Amino acid sequence: MELALNQPAPLLKRLSWFDWLFSAIVAAGGFYTLSRFGEYMDIYEKGILLTAIPAISVFGWFWKPFRVLFIVVGAISLFSISQYQGSLARMEEAFFLKYLISSQAAIMWMCALFGLATLSYWAGLLSRSEFTLKTASALTWSAVAMGFIGLMVRWYESYLIGTDVGHIPVSNLYEVFVLFSLITAMMYLYYEARSQTRQMGAFVLLIISAAVGFILWYTFDRGAHEIQPLVPALKSWWMKIHVPANFIGYGGFSIAAMLGVAYLLAQRGILATRLPKLEVIDDVMYKSIAVGFAFFTIATILGAMWAAEAWGGYWSWDPKETWALIVWLNYAAWLHIRLVKGLRGPMLAWWAVVGLFVTTFAFIGVNMFLSGLHSYGTL
Amino acid sequence: MNTPPHSFGKSVFELMSSMRFAISLLSILAVASIIGTVLKQAEPYNNYLIQLGPFWFEVYEKLGLYDVYQAFWFLLILAFLIVSVSVCITRNAPNFAREIKSFREHVTEQSLNAFKHKHEAATAHPPEALAASAQRYLEGQGYKVKNLPREGGVLLAAKAGSWNRLGYFLAHSSIVMILIGGLMDGNLIFKVQQILGYKKIETRDIPQSQVPAISRLTPSNPSFRGSVQIPEGSSADVAFLNVADGYLVQELPFTVGLKQFRIEHYTTGQPKSFESDLELFDHSGKKIREATIAVNHPLIHDGVAIYQASFADGGTRLTLRGWNLFSPSSEYFDVAGSVHQNTELTSAAGKYTIEFTDFRPFNIENMGGEVQPAGDTMSVLGGSPVSDKKHLRNVGPSFQYKLRDARGQALEFSNYMLPLELDGRWYLMSGVRESPNDAFRYMRMPLDAGGDIDSFMRLRGVLLNAALRPEIAARFARQALPENAWNTEIEAKLKFSATQVLALFAEGGFQSLGKFIEDKVPAAEGEKAAGTYLRILELTAFEALQIANRQNGLPPPKIDDATGWLVRDTLNSMSDMFVYGAPVYLQLAQYDEVKASGLQLTRSPGKNVVYFGSLLLTLGVFFMLYVRERRVWLRIKPGHALLAMSSAKHTIDFEKEFLRHTQALDTLAK
């Protein structure tokens, strides 16, 4: 009788040998970095590195596929870096670098793979082909891997340009758009596995494709892929945590908006038999907004703390800050309506869709139309 | 009005604590915030006046839209929000505290039967045995369980995720905390003092020491955010707070001295770091500490944080050469000045004031014209993110000044110290504009073989000298005509034409010539005449150059391309002179740079309150979103068990969990 009802074992006992191997690799990498580059890092950067070790470990235990992604990205990035032999000129000579895994090549592969994934998700959705949908997931995973390799290698390349130029690639609009695509895709893949349905990918990948389109236009028309040195205001360890936290927020809100579209279509009978049940779409929409909101809260607080150190005040009513507040209020209201009033259905789906416009304005519009302190990401 | 008084108070309380009221306030807050992002805040009032016109300017001013976030009504919304959320908390907190503790053990079998999520199972186990195993199971699932004897059996009351309610409490109190912290750092105290008449904004542009006490804030002011600019080698014991269309003087608890300000650049020319070496003294003059601050690395002393905010010129001393552009002489006179100071200038055209506004030791200019998109497709696909910044170049120092005439009209000038290469030749550039919104128009003065503008200035002097015109015309006529035409009427005519062209040009450049042709020559022959006059002008100018060289004891000019360009560029430049707007060109000969560092000084006692509030907010949000509150009851009677489950949020996860518990019960009951 008791056997059938095994209590959940304590966390540590549930871990497999692969979990431990993963953590060992993460820790080894972290401590190696600390011993090799520690003298160039300040106390905060060391803190971030040391905190990253358990954080990545636990995240890998919590979401198993992340372990594989981490190891693959790490291995290929290291291989790519070894190909440089300390010289940027190798980018044009070495075969792997030129066509596959120099930062720019990898990011272009990411763009291509996201495009293919979008097509596959739609093909799978329309033809009800589970195989095609599985392919789409695999393509999305590969795109994520390529994108992360691109960012890792870009980080290294920036140091090859000059030791004073080197910085984490989250500093301008081009880099954060890559980051946005990756984080959104990863969050989606997580929910895809949790809700055991792949059809929603067709909608989520649309917004990623839009971001990819922007990246391509920005690269070919504006040459935005060039690595620029940091302006003094951005030279801070805060950037390493403020920016990624923000993009978890933006990613969550984007997924929710696309699922809002799916919800509204399915509710009107369009694609209704092909999409998952309305409750499932609604549930994932809620979860994306919840995680997005939580991280957007953290990101805004981190931003305020950074502002207190860089601009002389934790809140200056700068247009970017103000619009971040508006976004925050918007989703706070959304969550209140749902959690306190218990409201569901098309109204919240519409609201999630409209929320994306508010978020997009806060993300890009402010930089384009309003001037302020936050003018790093101008078009 | 026979409504009992307590009912009014109660309905206010009801309104304030309702979520609808809070959400309305938040919406108003969001809309009000948008105003501040669309209308640029805290600009000089004149800008608004120009932008909006006198009527709307006043309306906007009354509404406080130039500083929305400190406007009376905006602060009022915040205050209402604080009250509303506080009331909401006080109203719900006791309930919530009870909920957290309570196992809701008073449920009846009847009410359990009415639950949407319930499950029944038949069992052969005695109630106590089943209760024991079910309790073990629930505790294993993270529930707190209470075992209560009930008529003919047992009731298990279990709960999990009580922290969800705690999350509510944390998140909402944190909002109150953050708002209070923010108000502590706002300028409420000053506002009150202003209304009561204790303090007044200073709007006059007077030295800081003359600002009366009514516009000064003492060092004990608990919160402020001001700025001050300190030149190298100087110090400051006050900061300035910008308020509305004026300012306040904030006295500091110490004196800040600037030893040195440094800018470092990347190899591409972009700025890399701004640093100030500071010294702090107490008011008796004793040095307290020394520190270097940089962007992102402020210094905190005595509760006052000192930030590197900006930089400017701190009064660079300039040694200048003044050239009288419309004088026939080619001598310059010496002018000395300092940035941020004025120099009087008396010229033939009247009295002028030079207001030196800025000096820049370097100017990074894009010399490559349009930025090229990054090459062909292949070079981007396999491409390099290494930027190609060859077109950016430092073109050296420049200084800016305003030249104000006796009537008070001013033009703004920007002059480069070093020559610039344009179209393969070198020029000294001087830019001029009427208003800060315009782009600079540049007058370019050609350099001679020696790299100076002396030849240009000499030739200009001769061309403007009416006394020399007959000689120039004579030389030109002799050069232009064959010997047999000398001393004929043709020569006299040519001399007359040459004199006329020179006189017209000296009066107003090419425009005067053009106007003359327009007025005097039939339209059909206009173009031909223009060509002839231009040719005459160039040739006479060449003769003028001969005279200029002779007067200064120099060898005659070589007849080559360089001389040709010098003559042509001189004519162009002279023509521009007439629209240059100033009778004098100031050439920068030497400078002694003094930099100034712009510091921001803040004292914000509310900061820690806000940070603590933020921590609570983060915890609260996570508890609210990620801790699910669930309750389970199991009523066991001999032979029969009834399971019921409830949660505030009926999510898919809840359904799954309920299913799991029903299966567990079936297994246990077997």
Image (cartoon, coloured by chain):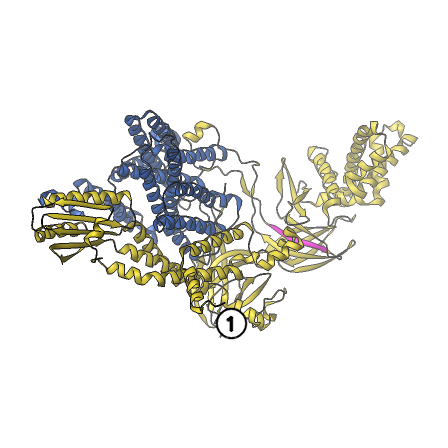
Chain colours: A blue, B yellow
User: Which residue is pictured at 33% across the width and 58% down the height?
Assistant: B170
Return the residue nearer the eye: B153 or B260: B153
Name which residue lies at 79% across and 44% down: B462
Q: Which quarter of the figure has residue A26? A: top left
* B399 inside magenta stretch: yes
Which image quadrant is residue A146 in? top left
Relative side of B238 to B497, left or right: left
Q: Chain of mark 1?
A: B
**Residue A87 percent coordinates (x, y):** 37, 36
Residue B272 visible in the current orientation: no
Q: Quick one: which residue is furthest to the bottom in this view?
A: B284
Q: Residue at x 48, y 68 (%)?
A: B2
Determine if residue B373 is in view: yes
Q: Is residue B261 above or below residue B456?
A: below
For this orientation, the residue located farthest to the front is B2
Tell me where the magenta segment starts and ends, as one range.
Answer: B398-404
- Residue A93 appears at what percent x and percent y? 38, 29
Q: Give the position of the C terminus of chain B as an image quadrant.
A: top left
- A266 relative position to B463: left or right: left
Up/down of B625 relative to B218, above or below: above
Answer with left or right where residue B515 lies relative to residue B363. right
Q: Which SS does the magenta portion mostly show?
A: strand
